[in-house]
Amino acid sequence: MLNLTIDGKKVSVEKGTTVLHAARKLGIEIPTLCYHEGVSPYGACRVCLVEVVKGIKTGLTTSCTCLAEEGMEVKSDSPRVLESRKLMVELLLARCPEAEKVKDLARKMGIEGVRFKREDKECILCGLCVRVCQEIIEASVIGFINRGANREVETPFQAQSDVCIGCGACSSVCPTEAIKIKEMFDKRILETWHTELELKSCKICGRYFVPKKELEHLKEKIELPEDIFEICTDCKRKSLTGKIGEIKTGAI
Amino acid sequence: MNDKMKRKVDLEKVINKYKAEKGGIISVLQEINREYGYLSEDALKLVAKKLDVPLIQVYSIATFYTAFSLKPRGRHLINVCLGTACFVKGGNRILEKLERELGIKAGETTKELRYSLDTVHCIGCCSLAPVIRIDEDAYGRLKQEKVPEILKKHK
Ligand code: SF4
Ligand code: FES
Ligand code: FES
């Protein structure tokens, strides 16, 4: 176990714990945008900044990527920390004035105006979608392209992807709802990724419910009985409750 | 064997050469870019397949470095210096003249694939400002009216 102090409070954590987690253990709230439990930290949004005291020097660092060390002294609410976070959020707000989560943070931090040139982007380049797609789904469809001010998350050649399975994990993890997905009868359309996928219909009710490619992908990854993929979740639930009903009434 | 096939064979050779290396993707792309003047969609797809990495990873790298081009480039590369010294001495007017002469903007390539036009920041001979470089040749103390004559030297 490692012992450190955050805002003067002592906490011991296991080796490999991030400062962010150590703080959460103490109930200290640190804002995050690009952090997600399920994927590796990336340190992109910089709203989780904290100050780490090293001897006479103190430095700002992102708490989601910084590992706790024995004897470490962390400040999460010093004026310098709060000011720097505010600046980060102000920059994000200038880039994405409509993003709810960014607006929320700005409101909480008391940011009123934006001193930078406004853009109308939706993506804050946090890279969560990229990491989820790569690490969890293992499809690696999207990634960062270009550099500097032109950096974007995109598919190769900004065109229809042949490896996208249409699972939509990217969109569900995106903090700014930047990834647009819609369903049209027998197709799922991932507008942001220029990709259209055919859906499979439920054997029982006939409703189109899952991209065929997602099924193939699942079948490869996990061993499950074949017919589990044939019926939609609604029908599964119905048949299950039906069975329970039968058991209860002694029909079986 | 037609030309396209031959190219493909060469491409595979290049890829195999760097296959074992760590960071081999960049080396492969550099060599392909050098050999063909740009990175075609097919080339990038082949690299991804042969090195067994996701296509997006290759595409990310290809779009990150300005040294790589995703479009065919001209036979001659014209670099117009817009570094401090050259800028002060009117480098931007030389650029305008070139753009007018060639009918393209900086960053573009002429239709017959003869010239590509780019800007750079200081090529290290500020005393000759304003300077342009065509392939390996530098032209200093340049005046707008000299531009057509210089272009003629590079067929
Ligand atoms: S699309 Fe959303 S999840 Fe993906 S990088 Fe942009 S903000 Fe993050
Ligand atoms: S949450 Fe730590 S940098 Fe984004
Ligand atoms: S500024 Fe042009 S050569 Fe230095």
Image (cartoon, rainbow, N blue to C red):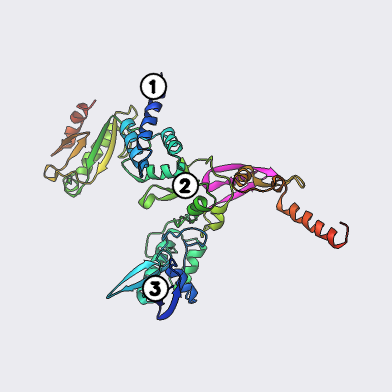
The image shows residue A188 at horizontal and vertical percentages of 62, 45
Magenta highlight: main SS: strand
Tell me the subunit letter for badge 3: A
- What residue is shown with label 2? A154
Which structural element holds mark 3? helix
Q: In this view of the protein, which residue sits in the foreground, B116 or B33?
A: B33
Q: Position of residue A54 (x, y in %)?
A: 31, 73
- The answer for how far apart the CA atoms under marks 2 and 1 are is 33 Å
Q: Given the current orientation, which residue lies at the most extreme bottom position?
A: A8
Q: Which residue is mark 3?
A: A82
Q: Which is more toward the observer, A232 or A179?
A: A232
Q: What residue does disc 1 label?
A: B3
Image quadrant of residue A50? bottom left
Assess whether residue B66 is covered by the magenta stretch: no
Tell me the element at label 2: strand
CA neighbours of label 3 inside 10 A, class few (<14), some (14 to 19), many (20+):
some
Q: Which residues are magenta?
A: A179-201
The amino acid type found where label 3 is placed reads: Leu
Q: Say whether residue B57 is left or right of residue A243.
A: left
Q: Position of residue A242 (x, y in %)?
A: 81, 57
